[in-house]
Every structure is written in C-alpha cells, then in structure tokens.
Image (cartoon, rainbow, N blue to C red):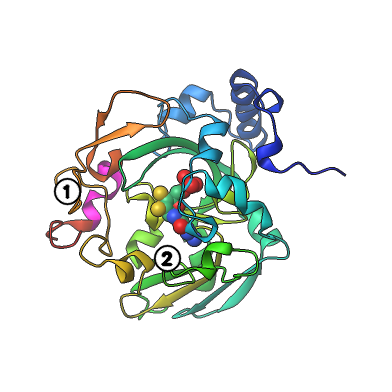
Amino acid sequence: MLIKKPDAIRPSELTPEPVYLNRRQFMLGSAGVLLSAEALAASPFSTREKENSWQEITHYNNYYEFGTDKSDPGENAGSLKVRPWQIAVDGEVAHPRHYGIEELLRFAQEERIYRLRCVEGWSMVIPWTGFPLASLLKQVQPTARARYVAFETLLRPSEMPGQREHTLAWPYREGLRIDEAMNPLTLLATGLYGKPLPNQNGAPIRLVVPWKYGFKSIKSIVRIHLMETLPATSWNLANPAEYGFYSNVNPAVDHPRWSQATERRIGEFFKRPTLPFNGYAEQVAALYRGMDLRKNY
Ligand code: MTE
C-alpha cells in the first residue's frame, strides 16, 4: 500500500466540509446518540467557530524537535516513526502500567472542536478526535499524594533533528495540576479532521489543553508521571520570566515582550480580542479561585 506523506496530500483529495459534517453526524449516530452538527457545536466542549483548514492546521506548526520555523515540522516530521509506540503511566498511581498505542486508539471516540491559542499571538480552531485524559488517569488510580501530572515527549535525536541542537532541554516536558488534568476539557488527541494525527501535529498522541497557551499542549507523549511536587517544564526551564507553570490564556497579563490582548486567527487579516481562558472561563475559572493569576502566570 502506498502511504502518502501528509504534505503530499493535495487539498482536492481531502474531505470537503459538507461531506465531513455529514460523516460526523453519522459517526455520532453510530455511537447511539443522534446529534445534529448544530447540537454538537452547542455542547460545552465544541466551539461553533469556523474550523481552520487541514492545510493551515498541518503547515503552520510549532514542534521544536523538527526545527523552529512554522514550516519546519510539516517538512521534517516525516522522519519520526510512530509505530510501535507506548506510553508509561506511573509515579503516584495505584496501578502503574504501559499502554500500547493500539489500546489508546480504542479509547478515542469523541470529536471536539477546540481553539488553540499560541503565545506568539496566533490562534486556530481545530477539530480533534481523542478522549479526556481523566478517563486514562481514572484507570491507573492516582494516589492521595498525586498533586501534579508531568508529561514527556519522545527523546530520539536520530529521528528528531531539533534534539541535536540546544534550543530546549530535551525531552520536551510539560505539566498540569491534578485538577487541571482531570478537567473534562483536557484531551488526549489522536486525530484531527477524523484522520490519524499527522506527525507535525504530535502523532501518535498529544495533549490539548484549550484554555492554556499552546506550548502546554505537548506532542508525541511517551510518559505520564504523577507527582507530589511541581514538575519541571521545558519552556519554564528555558525562560522562567516569560513562561510560568500555569500559562492560562490571559489577555490582562502581557508577555514581557508583547501584549496578549489580541490574536490573529490564521487565515484572517484583522486581529480579534483574546478571551480570558481562551473562551473557556465558564468551565475552568473555578479551578483558580483565590489565586493571583498575575503572579501565577
Ligand atoms: N510539543 C513538543 N514536544 N514540542 C514542541 O515544540 N510546541 C508547542 C506545543 N507542543 C511543542 C509541543 C507549541 S509552542 C504549540 S503552539 C503547539 O504545540 C502547536 O501545536 P500545533 O502545531 O498542532 O498547532
């Protein structure tokens, strides 16, 4: 079988939007819930905003393991072998274990349309397929000491040329507080537009935390480690004055070198105001009640 590299797929070969919407209704219908696209978009998990195209989502990326330009991941990530693949889930859990990617793909039945807002001021709307991280964590049963969750990307410089440079401390690391990790908005994504996740978007499995700046949404995960203490994160290690642990989208707090008040949706010309928590305040603002979000940036 000839498997085309994602960047070799012509836009004309991709599902046109009306067909895609029909298929989505069918997919949901087959799960026993008859939902119109309208009802889906009205769910608290999906936005009604216009989705970015496949071309935009897969050719304007941040994935420093494959270079620092937005076009580098689309050009270079084909070298990453995403099978076989395992994730270790360990640390403060009653039942540590390894999950093979085939088992994780069977978890993934939901589709959600989330905004991704990056720290440099651009945003996209992406139809992800995946499952809530909480469903995986519940299986391994966090102990009473589990206060944080640490995530690690694959370390394989032979296939990830960026890891041969000292741009970040490798492997790429991220972390969440346990209640953030258990929030139903926090997704492990395995696909987009109903197709397997392209390598440049974090194949075979990546995190999506829609109310935080994009760098929290770590790609190509091989380890999920539950901890009692605050985990180290790659961007915080690289520049603690600019990147804190929380990194909630906050138009009121500027990045030291630029304003975070507005954003440019990829494909649009005019900027739009950025919403607190990237528009997900109703679902997540309560997690931070009583915290000073200027100090905890
Ligand atoms: N994960 C890894 N392992 N390496 C990275 O460089 N970049 C992050 C995040 N996850 C990154 C990563 C940043 S800065 C952003 S904005 C998002 O991935 C971009 O996701 P996308 O390319 O799928 O839009």
Label tally: 2
Residue 51 spot, x, y in % from top left: 47, 29
- Residue 284 painted magenta: yes
Q: Residue at x 38, y 55 (%)?
A: 215
Lateral position of residue 155 relative to residue 166, left or right: right
Q: Residue at x 67, y 34 (%)?
A: 30
* Residue nearer the viewer, 115 or 244: 244
Residue 204 spot, x, y in % from top left: 62, 56
Relative to 158, residue 78 above or below:
above
> Which circle's residue, 1 or 2, is located before the other in the chain?
2
Relative to 46, residue 130 above or below:
below
Q: Amino acid at mark 2?
A: Thr
Quick check: can you spot residue 186? no
Residue 34 spot, x, y in % from top left: 58, 28
What label sits on residue 167 in the rendered view?
Answer: 2
Q: Amino acid at mark 1?
A: Asp
Our reading of the magenta stretch's main secondary structure is: helix
* Residue nearer the viewer, 167 or 6: 167
Relative to 259, residue 205 above or below:
below
For the C terminus, the image quarter is bottom left
Q: CA distance from mark 1 to mark 2?
A: 24 Å
Quick check: can you spot residue 85? yes
Q: Residue at x 38, y 46 (%)?
A: 210
Which residue is at the far top? 18
Q: Which residue is mark 1?
A: 254
Q: Residues within 10 Å of mark 1 (few under 14, many from 20)?
A: some
Which residue is at the far front? 165
Q: Which residues are magenta?
A: 281-287
- Residue 11 painted magenta: no
Q: Residue at x 71, y 43 (%)?
A: 5
Numbered disc 1: secondary structure: loop
